[in-house]
Amino acid sequence: EVQLVESGGGLVKPGGSLRLSCAASGFTFSSYSMNWVRQAPGKGLEWVSSISSSSSYIYYADSVKGRFTISRDNAKNSLYLQMNSLRAEDTAVYYCASLKGMDDYWGQGTLVTVSS
Amino acid sequence: QSALTQPPSVSGSPGQSVTISCTGTSSDVGSYNRVSWYQQPPGTAPKLMIYEVSNRPSGVPDRFSGSKSGNTASLTISGLQAEDEADYYCSLYTSSSTFGVVFGGGTKLTVL
């Protein structure tokens, strides 16, 4: 059974940092590009960042470029998102997801709240 | 990266058909066939309903179908059922360095 389990969310003050993790199992993680997608309370889905299977290609949404860093460790079947200089508008549920055609897997999400 | 344009809401009665549109440009929807559709009931993660414009994953009822014409992709739900009430999102996946993935703004489907 495919599983993606996010962790690391929580309450952080504006300007602070947080590191999200996503543990993958049940599929060949090292063969998949992976993504972070977020959803602010009551809002739609927003793609945040993508990383290719070997970490050769990395993309970011303009809204997080320069503040967030995506990475992965294929030996640990894990995906990460380092979030710095957090803003109130970064408050959202963060999902890790594969988004690859029929091989479309999502975690349950982890809530990040940026508030003083 | 501009979000793809979806109507904020659609509605239909049980048994009817509804279509949700997803409009982009010739540079995105018009150029790529990696359009997916997701269903998201409140408080849950999105569920894939259609991938690559018109393909249904196993387990998705054939009442759900997808198509594309020009810069607009569409999701049609026929034989509407109460359990179909949810938010629906289109997405476009590319390997472009300009943008990786873009989502539509979402459409709330209400079953009357």
Image: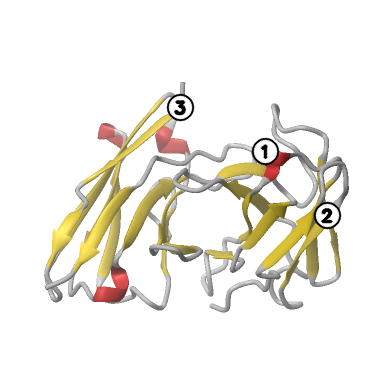
Mark seen at residue B18: 2
**Disc 3/disc 1 C-alpha distance (Å):** 25 Å
Q: Is residue B84 above or below residue A52?
A: above
Classed neighbour count for the residue bearing mark 3: other residues with Cα under 10 Å, few (<14), some (14–19), many (≥20): few
- Where residue A2 appears, as percent x and y from the top left, is 45, 27
Q: Residue A89's spot in the image, x, y percent?
A: 31, 75
Query: Which one is in front, B90 or A60?
Result: B90
Q: Amino acid at mark 2?
A: Val
Q: Amino acid at mark 3?
A: Val
The mark total stands at: 3
Q: Disc 3 vs disc 1: which is toward the camera?
A: 1
Quick check: B1 above or below B47? Answer: below
> Which quadrant would residue B108 be assigned to in this image?
bottom right
**Quadrant where the C terminus of chain A lies?**
bottom left
Residue behind mark 1: B83
For this view, does B10 lie left or right of residue A84? right
Q: CA distance from mark 2 to mark 3?
A: 32 Å
Asked which secondary structure carries label 1, the reply is helix
Q: Give the numbered dot on residue A71.
A: none
Q: Rate crowding at label 1 as few (under 14), some (14 to 19) or many (20 or more) other CA atoms within 10 Å.
A: few
**Which chain is disc 3 placed on?**
A
Q: Does any portion of residue B35 appear in the rendered image? A: no
Q: Amino acid at mark 1?
A: Glu
| Residue under numbered circle 3 | A2
Q: Position of residue B6 (x, y in %)?
A: 69, 69
- Chain ID of residue with mark 1: B
**Residue found 58% across the figure and 74% down from its top:** B3
The chain letter under disc 2 is B
